């Protein structure tokens, strides 16, 4: 019976109509007998998708097509002789991994659904007419091995230009062109078929034109709220911008002292500033230090009556000023004290000093004492804001470090030229990037820093073996004969190389990881870099996010220096400048 269903109609057959629509991806309706407004919308969407007149009325033609698709053998749980041909086609266009037979199983449905998602189709896992048409369009593309097309000249020139080169520029699509297209598809995370389909051509054009891609990541805080969170940390943002400025501390918070030293040879120090009496307490060698108390007047020596009153070994003694020198006034802090920007307790606090801390006095006053401050200090609110506001930063602070510049190994090798053992290791960095989703240039920047541009001992290789207890130790001339399983190992990122024993600890970590070649150290180390920084739970996948961690301010943050991210940019940019047409992907935080 050829019956139409329309809005306002109630019929038991509407239930199966709704179930069919839901199965094909046009769902979210109440499954009942009522053909309401939303059902009409879904029918209209179905009609439009399958090139029928979009009326919203389920006329016989619409119902017939719906039933035909719902009952197709090209869906999970069914079997048909043509399924094997379908699977062959899917395999050819980059969606393989299935057993080639007549059964349409769950994995086949999964691959079809992946195909549909990638190409913007309804991802229902069913090979309907639209899906079949898209599969055939790619399968029969003129841009594949063994065919010729005039557009291939343009595509080959583009591939050559962006580093997938050495292709003869002509109309023929040969095996070498297929190889280069597959390399490009793999690097772009596209289905690897070797066919220039629509998505591959779009990506190729994008890369060729060096299209810069911008993303925004929203955060449910304002810039000022982020600023307050940063300033409220136990260690707020630090800076060296004020390092040449003096600081001020309340004089009452200090215990003062001034040291001096003997400048003559065999100098007598006396119990009184008088050379006419038998009052020598000690004869001191050049360089002997003492505590200076004050200047006093005594007997003349060479026409000079000025003496120093000093403390030495707990005694108050005297030495003529021509035979000694006094140093700068210094002091120690009595109790926890703030160091201020000016002689006001409401001025900016540079930092706090604990009891017993030493300071170098510039000028002692009755209320305030001026001192030489330390290099790193708490940054001022407005200065922090200049580095925290994402809109005010260089784009390269927002370079997505999980993305790749997608250039050839020969281009990466330009960056590595002359960099010790890293010279020529472009392919290893590309493999590391693909495997662990960490930007090649960032990995190289990290490795150059940790290995002294590829020249450190850990970069050049250190021998490690196991002792009689099975523990790894460094090999040397005295223990070599006693060790087993000796390997030369490498560590390119300083992983496990702790200060004080970096060489030993870094080599032993490399031995345990099996990094017995430069390539393995690069690829294996990239896993640690990715997991620790780029792909951690906070997704700190840009320099900006490493520094400020906008999703969870405080920990982990890569540095306390408010300018850390800005200081990394010039190095990263200089390396990118050596690449031809790299892809640039930026992810910029967007605060509320």
Image: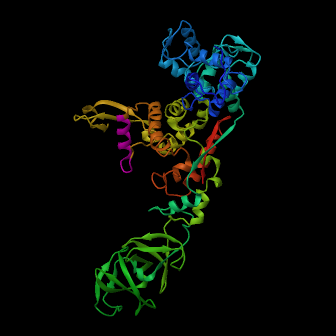
Q: What secondary structure predominates along the stretch shown in magenta? A: helix
Instruction: From the viewer's side, name the closer residue of 365 and 318.
Output: 365
**Quarter of the figure with residue 410:** top right
Task: Determine the residue positioned at 67% across, 10% down.
Answer: 146
**Quarter of the figure with residue 117:** top right
Q: Residue furthest top?
A: 81
Give coordinates of residue 191: x percent, y percent. 58, 23
Task: Inspect this view and state whether residue 256 appears.
Answer: no
Q: Quadrant of the C terminus?
A: bottom right
Instruction: From the viewer's side, name the closer residue of 245 and 173.
Output: 173
Vertically, is 128 above or below 522? above
Classify residue 240 as left or right of residue 336.
right
Give coordinates of residue 58: x percent, y percent. 66, 23
Q: Which residues are magenta?
A: 498-512
| Colour pattern of the rendering | rainbow
> Is residue 27 a member of the stretch shown in magenta?
no
Give coordinates of residue 502: x percent, y percent. 38, 46
Give coordinates of residue 73: x percent, y percent. 54, 12
Instruction: From the viewer's side, name the closer residue of 40 and 318.
Output: 40
């Amino acid at each position: 019976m050829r019956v139409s269903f329309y809005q306002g109609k109630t019929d038991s057959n509407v239930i199966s109509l709704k179930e069919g629509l839901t199965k094909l991806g046009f769902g979210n309706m109440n499954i009942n007998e009522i053909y309401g407004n939303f059902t009409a919308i879904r029918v209209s969407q179905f009609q439009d998708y399958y090139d029928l007149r979009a009326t919203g009325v389920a006329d016989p033609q619409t119902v017939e097509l719906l039933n035909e698709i719902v009952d197709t053998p090209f869906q999970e749980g069914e079997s048909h002789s043509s399924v094997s041909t379908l699977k062959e086609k899917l395999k050819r266009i980059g969606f393989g991994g299935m057993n080639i037979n007549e059964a349409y199983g769950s994995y086949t449905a999964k691959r079809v659904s992946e195909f549909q998602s990638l190409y913007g189709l309804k991802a229902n896992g069913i090979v309907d007419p639209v899906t079949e048409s898209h599969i055939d369009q790619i399968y029969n593309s003129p841009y594949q091995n063994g065919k010729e097309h005039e557009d291939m000249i343009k595509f080959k020139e583009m591939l050559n230009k962006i580093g997938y080169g050495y292709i003869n520029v002509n109309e023929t699509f040969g095996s070498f062109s297929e190889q280069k297209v597959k390399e490009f598809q793999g690097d772009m995370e596209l289905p690897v078929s070797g066919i220039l389909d629509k998505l591959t051509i779009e990506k190729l054009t994008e890369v060729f034109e060096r299209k810069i891609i911008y993303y925004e990541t929203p955060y449910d805080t304002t810039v000022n709220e982020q600023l307050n969170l940063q300033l409220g940390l136990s260690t707020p943002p630090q800076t060296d911008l004020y390092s040449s400025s003096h600081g001020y501390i309340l004089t009452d918070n200090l215990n003062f002292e001034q040291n001096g030293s003997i400048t003559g040879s065999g100098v007598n120090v006396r119990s009184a500033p008088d050379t006419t009496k038998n009052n020598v307490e000690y004869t001191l060698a050049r360089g002997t230090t003492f505590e200076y108390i004050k200047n006093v007047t005594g007997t003349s020596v060479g026409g000079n009556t000025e003496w120093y009153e000093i403390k030495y070994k707990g005694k108050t003694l005297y030495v003529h000023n021509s035979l000694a020198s006094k140093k700068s006034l210094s002091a120690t802090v009595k109790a926890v004290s703030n160091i201020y920007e000016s002689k006001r307790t409401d001025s900016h606090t540079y930092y706090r000093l604990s009891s017993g801390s030493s300071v170098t006095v510039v000028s002692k006053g009755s209320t305030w004492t001026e001192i030489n401050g330390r290099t790193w200090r708490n940054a001022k609110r407005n200065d922090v804001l200049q580095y925290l506001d994402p809109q005010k930063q260089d784009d390269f602070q927002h370079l997505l470090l999980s993305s790749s510049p997608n250039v050839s190994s020969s281009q990466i090798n330009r960056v590595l030229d002359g960099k010790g053992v890293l010279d020529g290791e472009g392919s290893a960095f590309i493999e590391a990037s693909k495997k662990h989703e960490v930007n090649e240039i960032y990995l190289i920047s990290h490795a150059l820093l940790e290995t002294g541009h590829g020249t450190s001992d850990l970069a050049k290789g250190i021998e490690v073996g196991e002792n009689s207890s099975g523990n790894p130790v460094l090999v040397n001339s005295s223990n070599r004969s006693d060790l087993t399983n000796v390997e030369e190992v490498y560590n390119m990122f300083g992983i496990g190389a702790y200060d004080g024993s970096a060489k030993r600890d870094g080599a032993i970590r490399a031995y345990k990881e099996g990094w017995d070649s430069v390539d393995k150290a690069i690829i294996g180390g990239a896993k640690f870099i990715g997991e620790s920084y780029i792909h951690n739970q906070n997704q700190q996948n840009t320099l900006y996010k490493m520094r400020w961690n906008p999703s969870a301010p405080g920990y982990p943050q890569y540095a306390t220096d408010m300018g850390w991210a800005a200081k990394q940019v010039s190095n990263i940019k200089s390396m990118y400048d050596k690449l031809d047409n790299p892809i640039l992907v930026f992810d910029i935080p967007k605060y509320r």
